């Protein structure tokens, strides 16, 4: 099983600041089968990024994904108030797994 | 509107059984693989199971293999999860999830549509 590790566990920032979230896989991901989701309290996750760097439909361009192999990054260029949430990475290869999440909260 | 609506959650005793259903609308259900993902209260996401578009191939995480059975009825646009030998650690919100691109087989994609989830509580 591929284990995903996310860091930091919590990121305390202010609106307008840049957020950089990390996801590391225990082994290299084939074809960069890596996605990022945003989840707010009481809501299901929302797909943000797939294929490590492709934005899903309707996702603002302040969200960007990068990385390959075992190291991946989600960047939010300028935090909006609605971006404060928990973010999960997800590898969707043959045995899918999720990372433990990074909470982005108000400083 | 593309929509997934889960039902069937509730309180069940350890060792008991429960069947979850997920009604799909707004897309051609029979074209897509479907998944169940769960989230224990206050915890992260855990992958549970997958079924291909035809219902002929399934996958289970180690934590539920042998106890849960995923199935689908394409004529009713409905996904199911039959849960047996339930344990307290199965307590979670169970999300029905649509594969973004794939019908199954050697094809992998992210998950683009999630239901609101149904809560399963296993407790005596």
Image (cartoon, coloured by chain):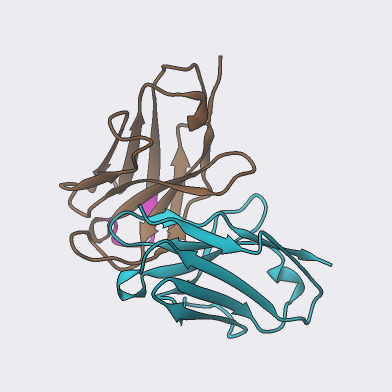
Chain colours: A cyan, B brown
Q: Where is residue A15 in the image (x, y as percent from the top left)?
A: 80, 77
Residue at the farthest front position: A26
Q: Where is residue A81 in the image (x, y as percent from the top left)?
A: 76, 72
Rendered view: B115 above or below A79: above
Q: Where is residue A8 in the image (x, y as percent from the top left)?
A: 66, 64
Check the picture and name the quadrant holding the C terminus of chain B. Answer: top right
Residue at the farthest right position: A107
Q: Where is residue A19 in the image (x, y as percent from the top left)?
A: 68, 76
Q: Which residue is drawn at 32% across and 28% down?
A: B67
The reply to whether residue B1 is in sight is no
Looking at the rendering, the stretch of residues picked out in magenta corresponds to: B24-29
Q: In which quarter of the image is residue B72?
A: top left
Q: Residue at x 45, y 62 (%)?
A: A90
Check the picture and name the quadrant holding the N terminus of chain B. Answer: bottom left
Q: Residue at x 55, y 77 (%)?
A: A59
**Apparent side of residue A82 relative to residue A32 in the rendered image (left or right):** right
Q: Between residue B111 and residue A70, name the one nearer to us.
A: A70
Check residue B28 for magenta coloring. yes
The reply to whether residue B38 is in sight is yes
Q: In which quarter of the image is residue A32?
A: bottom left
Residue at the farthest left position: B56
**Apparent side of residue B56 relative to residue A81 in the rendered image (left or right):** left
Q: Between residue B121 and residue A35, name the one nearer to us.
A: A35
């Amino acid at each position: 099983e591929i284990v995903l590790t996310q860091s930091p566990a919590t990121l305390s920032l202010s609106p307008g600041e840049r957020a950089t979230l990390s996801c590391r896989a225990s082994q290299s991901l084939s074809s960069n089968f890596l996605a990022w989701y945003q989840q707010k309290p009481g809501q299901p996750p929302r797909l943000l990024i797939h294929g490590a760097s492709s934005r899903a439909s309707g996702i603002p361009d302040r969200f960007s994904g990068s990385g390959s192999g075992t190291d991946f990054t989600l960047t939010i260029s300028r935090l909006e108030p609605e971006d404060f949430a928990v973010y999960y990475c997800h590898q969707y290869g043959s045995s899918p797994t999720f990372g433990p999440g990074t909470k982005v909260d108000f400083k | 509107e593309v929509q997934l609506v889960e039902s069937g959650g509730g309180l069940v005793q350890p060792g008991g059984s429960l069947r979850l259903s997920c009604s799909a609308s707004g897309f051609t259900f029979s074209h897509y693989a479907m998944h169940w993902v769960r989230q224990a209260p206050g915890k992260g996401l855990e992958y549970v199971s997958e079924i291909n578009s035809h219902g002929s191939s399934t996958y289970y995480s180690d934590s539920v293999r042998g106890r849960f059975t995923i199935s689908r009825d394409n004529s009713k646009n409905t996904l199911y999860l039959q849960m047996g030998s339930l344990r307290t650690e199965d307590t979670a919100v169970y999300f029905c999830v649509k594969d973004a691109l794939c019908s199954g087989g050697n094809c992998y994609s992210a998950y683009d549509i999630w239901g609101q989830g149904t809560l399963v509580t296993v407790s005596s």
